[in-house]
Amino acid sequence: MTTPTPDMLTPFVTTHRILTSFASILISTALCTQAVHAQDTQKVDFAAHRNATALAERLQAKEGIPSSTTLSLLKQAELLPQVVKAVMPPKTKGVRNWDTYRSRFVEPYRIRKGVEFWDANLDTLKEAEAKYGIPQEVIVAIIGVETIYGQHIGNYRVLDSLATLAFAYPEGQKDRSEFFLSELEAFIALCNRTHLDALEVKGSYAGAIGLGQFMPSSWTAYAVDGDADGIVDLFHSRRDAIFSVANFLKVHGWETGKATRVLVDIEHADNLKELLAPDIVPTFTPAVMQQKGVKLKGETLPDEKLALIELVRGDAEPAFVAGGHNFYVVTRYNRSSFYANAVLELSEALKLRRDMLN
């Protein structure tokens, strides 16, 4: 019998070989996917952790949630190695750079989408400003920096993230497991009160949720039912999210008329060390800053306190800005001078762009 050459193969044999090859590819792809998923999550019985029983008992005493329900929930939580990695310090310490940080947030797309978000929610923003005294552009900018106006609210299951950081916080750095344990407790209580499914809620790797990326305890403390429908929904209700961000800033001390950030010129650097010592805490009056060589290029109240903020730029010369009382209030949302300055610069860019268009 003659051995068939490739061009002599029947349609049946050719089809069979194609299907067999395709099946092999599918199997290989499935195995690769499983391998990747196995690296992303690890099955650990968090209910067996030494702090789990105490957590369950607290939730039963405070919220009436049966201990067995909490422990059952923890059994279904998964360890996320990528979350552990995210909170680890980098192996090689990089140089902080304000220019790089700024380019992520004060950029054309976020400005354009921010103006669209502002126009689409104008009435709500006006009401929030009237009620809480927070400028509309600042509310918009925070939601813009946090989630690009709701486009990216996070893909991590919050239960997994918080359980990982509460029960498996990496060693070799400042231990923040107690903080995340309290957030895990707040999250389970929040889900019980609001009927959110704790196995479905998605958020950031650190457990922040919704358009404004509130930690569970902040949701409990500061979230507002802006649309008065009896439900606080920071995922889908823009009105709730806008009012909640405004309420957070108001509760943390925002004062209408106080400075946010003021541009400066450093006329001489003799007193820089003294001026920078308080970090972000407003300490010096405008007159004192002027006397110590810092020329303010914006309006401030005569008696209000300012902080000189250094914005390091890698190997380049640092930039400086004076942070007022309301600059400090923005750092209560995220305790970073880079964060507050990015929010406030974005808010200025949004207002400028919208004023030009209108």
Image (tube, rainbow, N blue to C red):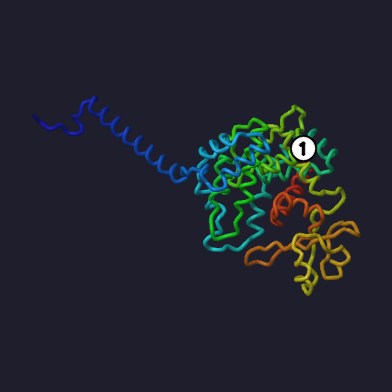
Please say whether residue 155 is visible from this viewpoint: no
Answer left or right for 59 relative to 29: right
Residue 121, position as x, y percentages in the image: 75, 34
Residue 317 or residue 33, whichever sits in front = 33
Q: Quadrant of residue 159?
A: top right
User: Which quadrant, please, contains the C terminus?
Assistant: top right
Answer left or right for 331 relative to 49: right
Residue 324 or residue 312, whichever sits in front = 324
Instruction: Characterize the local packing of mark 1: few (<14), some (14-19) or many (20 or more) Cα atoms within 10 angstroms.
Output: many
Give the residue displayed 63% in from the left and 56% down from the top: 100
255 w.r.t. 194: above or below: below
Answer left or right for 108 relative to 156: right
Type of amino acid under label 1 = Phe
Q: In which quarter of the image is residue 289?
A: bottom right
Residue 238, position as x, y percentages in the image: 71, 34
Give the residue displayed 75% in from the left and 60% down from the top: 280
11 w.r.t. 212: above or below: above
Taking the view exactly as shown, the residue that stands out farthest to the right is 302
SS for tag 1? helix
